[in-house]
Amino acid sequence: MSQLKGNALVGQSGGPTAAINASLAGVIRGVLAHRDAIPELYGMRNGIEGFRQGDVVSLLPLFDGENKLRQLEQTPAAALGSCRKKLPDPKKEPAFYEDLVARFKEKNIRYFFYIGGNDSMDTVAKLSAYLANADYEMRVVGVPKTIDNDLADTDHTPGFGSAAKYVAVTLSEIVRDCAVYRVPAVTIVEIMGRDAGWLTASAALPGAINGEGVDLIYLPERPFTFERFTEDLKTAFLKHPNLVVAISEGIRSPEGRYIGEGAQSGALDAFGHKYLAGAGKVLESFVKETFGCKVRSFELSLPQRCASHLASDTDLTEAAKLGDAAVGAAVAGKTAVMAALERKPGDVYGCEVVFRPVDRIANAIRRVPDEFINDRGNGITPAGIAYLAPLIRGERKVEYRDGLPIHAII
Amino acid sequence: MSQLKGNALVGQSGGPTAAINASLAGVIRGVLAHRDAIPELYGMRNGIEGFRQGDVVSLLPLFDGENKLRQLEQTPAAALGSCRKKLPDPKKEPAFYEDLVARFKEKNIRYFFYIGGNDSMDTVAKLSAYLANADYEMRVVGVPKTIDNDLADTDHTPGFGSAAKYVAVTLSEIVRDCAVYRVPAVTIVEIMGRDAGWLTASAALPGAINGEGVDLIYLPERPFTFERFTEDLKTAFLKHPNLVVAISEGIRSPEGRYIGEGAQSGALDAFGHKYLAGAGKVLESFVKETFGCKVRSFELSLPQRCASHLASDTDLTEAAKLGDAAVGAAVAGKTAVMAALERKPGDVYGCEVVFRPVDRIANAIRRVPDEFINDRGNGITPAGIAYLAPLIRGERKVEYRDGLPIHAII
């Protein structure tokens, strides 16, 4: 493979995570290490959508030292902005891609790096497919991120480890908080992940690590029934009065109906607005009526994906490594691939960076496997803990100013 | 004042905070420094309720080194457990107090320290009032804590600074998260504090400190109207498309009705359960109907008061200092008082420990003063920022094991 010389373009797409900027820092480091092949690195603002409007920023002058790259790594959300744009089929709408290529030519873009989840890998796959038959040489590499950990063909996804650490640390604190009273009470915590229960599964870590954990865990991978939930609570109350229950936002009935959505009856509140309810609120009402005890529910919500002050060092380090490796691989000739993690066998945790065909990854969903969920469907097995535990390890020394973490703004 | 020799008893009461165990660590240090007067320190489990059932633990053997006390300081919630017990009027039910005194005598308790908020100071006041006319000498000192910061006669309350830091850091991360898309969207964050808006006011800190902050802030101290809210959102949308709104759970209509509670219509969901809605969900529905844009709401909920991994060093240090000083003051003869903070004048932040009569404090509520809230009632003034900013400063080096903070379990 002859060396391809030209500029690089990088973008971020889909929902933000605590590690997506670490991936960007990795791409920047990768380009800095290959200046012979890549003289200039452009960032697209708001992903491919912003690029189509000509909204790009020259990144190398902004990150002229390791200190600034470290600040970028501790910044939550997508520093370049994001978008949710599904690209058209290259065969049906070639004009869309002709316009893109014209823009690539204008800036002599020969390397394209896209950091994102499922939809972003779809973009990488479609762009690669179009370029395979186009008269323009450009290498396209996907860099994975998603807190949901549901991307196929990788051991896990950058962004997940930090979100899992947020869930685990927060639940370890909530378990302490709930233990202070003696009256029977149920606290229900709703966790992100509509189709895959990886993040909810990480609620099992406090119990596994220090013996003080949540009592029940329900994933979308197993059907949820109120009968079984009632039995589970009764059994748990025999052990202690303060129960903490972790549920995925996506838990479903055996018929496949979301417990949250299923509750919407169209009823109006006293102001005439429609009620909104998630799975947690539905279970809260159910427990109140069935057990008559103190009960509350809440969603961990946005902090799960943006609490970079609590990021996993393992996660940030891997995210940056993948971004860096993506550049090296592209310079060495790879295209139409996604940088992925392959776990090394053995007891000591470690991952190697590998490259996988991106067309196999786009639009596939990787769910929590059966062997990670206990038979009763209300907890995580030792095999699941062994998979999850290394991903939350390690803490960064976060730089603060006046009591707040310093964020890098592009 | 002659020296009073005897054992000490300490308890925690009311809602947990990230700093209440730092106050306990302070009391333990204070006793260790006065072993000549106080040979033994007992902790009551679950406050005065547990003590009445004889549930006490000898604390000094458990905390035999500064390392363990530091671990206690980084442990969320009440390590001794808590209770919500309102004591009876000593004049009407003297038998209740006679029973308590019999138990004090049994263990030769001569010093009583109670760490808590409003209700706990009521306990301190009532016990002090009874003892003033009883034939048993015991000194009773309150040690303040509450995330709500609504205790009277103190500049601020331990526990508040850490909760405020959680709110400020989390909102600085949420603001980054919400900034990634270009489509108009409103994110509503509901913050604790039903009667006083101190914690919600701290949502103003990210904007004041680094210029990237929330757009609108509504406290319970000012009446909330949907008309004004609509105008405020319209004005805010002129500046940028992604709005973040911080509201207190206790915002009320001009007639004094809680916006959250006011919404309950008794309507049932599809499972036949009653709907539950807080102020955030009510505003979410309103924005969806009025503006038709993307909107979401969530509560910061329990993590506000138990996120000790993100505690303010200023807060923990002051909490420990008050616990320590309470012991010193009691040994020196003080009783029927609460340890309080008095801010030193001048530009450099600092507080002195002072002691205030506890009967003045019990059951009073200190609200956010007018001069801290802007004229429009949707933001915080520079005077408010000057009050709040020092309280969130400083971070502890938290000790982690396997990715989770280490907690001290008593």
Image: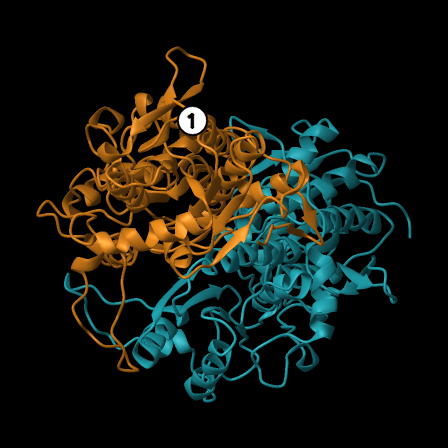
Chain colours: A cyan, B orange
Quadrant for the N terminus of chain B in the image: top left
Q: Nearer the viewer, residue A60 or B37?
A: B37
Identify residue for label 1: B329
A398 on left or right of A282: right
Residue B270: where, in percent of width, then height?
A: 28, 81
Q: Could you tell me which quadrant the C terminus of chain B lies in?
A: bottom right
Residue B56: give x, y in percent of width and height: 49, 55
**Chain identifier of the residue bearing label 1 in the image:** B
Residue type of the residue flagged with mark 1? Ala
Extreme residue in the right direction: A1
Residue drawn at the location 54% of the way across and 73% of the way down? A217
- Answer left or right for B159 relative to B60: left
Residue B149 position in % (x across, y down):
33, 37
**Residue found at the very far front of the displayed protein:** B135
Mark 1 residue element:
helix
Q: Is residue B182 visible?
A: no
Residue B179 position (above or below residue A121): above
Q: Is residue A25 left or right of residue B367?
A: right
Assess disc 1: are there few (<14), some (14-19) or many (≥20) residues with their C-alpha within 10 Å of its C-alpha.
Answer: some
Q: Quadrant of residue A343?
A: bottom right
Q: Residue B153's x, y, as percent?
A: 28, 28
Location of residue B120 with respect to B4 vertically, above or below: below
Specify the quadrant of the image occupied by residue A234: bottom left
Horizontally, residue B371 falls left or right of residue B27, namely left
* Residue B38 against residue A209 in the figure, above or below: above
Pick the front one: A191 or A355: A191
